[in-house]
Image: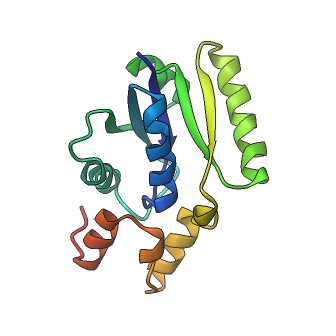
Amino acid sequence: MRICLFPGTFDPVTLGHVDIIDRALPLFDKIYIGIGVNAAKSPMFSAEQRLQWFKDIYQGNNKIESVAFEGLTVDYCKQIGAKFILRGIRYVSDFEYEKTIADANRTLDKNIETIFLTGEPKYTSVASTIVRDIIKNGGDASPFLPQAVISSLKNKQLI
């Protein structure tokens, strides 16, 4: 079975994230969306909220499971039996950063391969950092967000 982990903070989940996941679906038998929990970071949205968004977006799709994890990505890959780490690339600068992480992960476990997918051009400018800034300042971030996220923000039904 080809099992993959797509790790990230996903704070919030954007159309760019969904694009990468949707295009990775035919490549893997199972995709775990791993929300990294880092005590040093204070995200805008709770891990529970981000997990729920993915559950809502991929409701009924048994190839997708959203999970929260702490610690090294390669260690979590071993826990779930993933041989692949999925990463999205928007710009050349993303690749340079992501390659450094992929090289470190390969050093830690040579049996886990990092797979890079480039984002659709229309989602290149979609970054969680920008989306958070729009939300914090009362702007309309809906052009960058999946419907499940838009609905919970509009209805202020956040976990």
Residue 152 visible at all: yes
> In the image, what residue occupies the spot 48% across and 50% down?
9
> In the image, what residue occupies the spot 30% across and 55% down?
53
Residue 38 visible at all: no
Out of 16 and 5, give the one closest to the viewer: 16
**How far across and how far down the image is residue 109, in percent?**
62, 15
Numbered-mark total:
0
* Quadrant of the snapshot with the C terminus: bottom left
> In the image, what residue occupies the spot 60% across and 13% down?
111
> In the image, what residue occupies the spot 46% across and 79% down?
136
Corner quadrant of residue 43: bottom left
* Quadrant of the snapshot with the N terminus: top left
Q: Residue furthest front?
A: 26
**How far across and how far down the image is residue 52, in percent?**
26, 52
Q: Is 41 positioned to the left or the right of 47 in the image?
A: right
Q: Residue furthest top?
A: 111
Q: Is 107 positioned to the left or the right of 69 in the image?
A: right
